[in-house]
Image: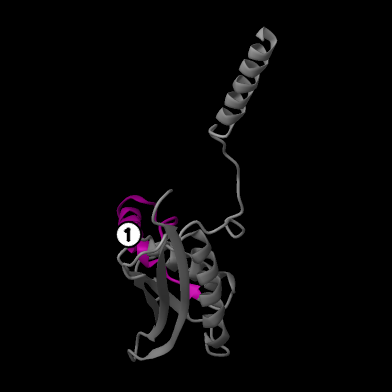
């Protein structure tokens, strides 16, 4: 009987120890492109896939043959209900366009800093080392865009799970700054469905 009690205690202790291991914290590096999607919301896989698809769509038709135009990037407007960093979308798309070697980019996001540095050099730097003022190149085109979202969920009725659909649409436009004409508009769409249990976690 005493031996059986000791065996039972040892078994319970082992089970508790192995159970605690499941709750230990762990950290590991994961490839963002290969990581699984946990929710229907915007995530890192959307950032990677949308920017790849959008930059490829743009480069199929832009720039015109024989041109290497200067482009100003004015960001992507967030029209969703979520607080999303759409600047990362604009940065990644413009980076891919620049890497293609077919366009040049003006640094619109750092324009104030550029002018401040030029002013500093004009007043404080030696004549032979200061940059020339008024020599910045003007852009011929501007890149703008928007991200919109449509969210729908299953109606209330007796069920064990709730279904939610989230539709995203990323739109990018390139506009001729001289004429104001839109020379290119491309869209990337994604619908993702999530099913959540009503009871449980």
**Residue 140 makes an appearance in the image:** no
Task: Report the coloring of the rendering.
Answer: one colour
> Which residue: 39% across, 64% down?
86
With respect to residue 28, does 73 lie above or below? below
> Which residue: 34% across, 91% down?
179
Is 109 one of the magenta-colored residues?
Answer: yes
Q: Position of residue 98 (x, y in %)?
A: 53, 71
**Residue 48 makes an appearance in the image:** yes
Drawn side of residue 190 relative to residue 119, left or right: right
Q: Position of residue 97 (x, y in %)?
A: 53, 73
Q: Position of residue 87 (x, y in %)?
A: 39, 63
With respect to residue 144, does 17 lie above or below? above
Viewer-proximal residue among 71 and 90: 90
- Secondary structure at badge 1 equals loop
Q: Which residues are magenta?
A: 104-131
Q: Quadrant of residue 22?
A: top right
Dot 1 corresponds to which residue?
Answer: 83
Drawn side of residue 198 relative to residue 94, left or right: left
Q: Quadrant of residue 5?
A: top right
With respect to residue 20, does 128 lie above or below? below
Viewer-proximal residue among 75 and 6: 6
Is 57 one of the magenta-colored residues?
Answer: no
Q: Quadrant of residue 19?
A: top right
Drawn side of residue 14 relative to residue 199, left or right: right
> Main SS of the magenta segment?
helix
Q: Quadrant location of the N terminus?
A: top right
């Amino acid at each position: 009987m005493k031996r059986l009690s000791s065996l039972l205690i040892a078994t319970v202790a082992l089970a508790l120890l192995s159970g605690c291991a499941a709750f230990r914290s762990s950290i590991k590096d994961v490839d963002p492109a290969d990581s699984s999607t946990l929710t229907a919301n915007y995530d890192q896989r959307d950032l990677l896939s949308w920017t790849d698809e959008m930059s490829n769509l743009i480069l199929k038709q832009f720039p015109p043959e024989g041109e290497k135009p200067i482009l100003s990037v004015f960001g992507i407007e967030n029209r969703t209900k979520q607080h999303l960093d759409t600047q990362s979308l604009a940065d990644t798309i413009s980076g891919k366009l620049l890497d293609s070697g077919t366009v040049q980019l003006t640094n619109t996001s750092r324009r104030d800093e550029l002018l401040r540095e030029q002013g500093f050099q004009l007043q404080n730097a030696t004549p032979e080392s200061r940059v020339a003022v008024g020599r910045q190149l003007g852009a011929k085109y501007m890149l703008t865009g928007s991200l919109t979202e449509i969210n729908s969920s299953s109606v209330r009725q007796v069920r064990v799970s709730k279904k939610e659909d989230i539709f995203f649409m990323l739109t990018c436009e390139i506009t001729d700054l001289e004429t104001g004409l839109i020379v290119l508009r491309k869209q990337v769409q994604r619908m993702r469905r999530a099913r959540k249990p009503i009871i449980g976690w």
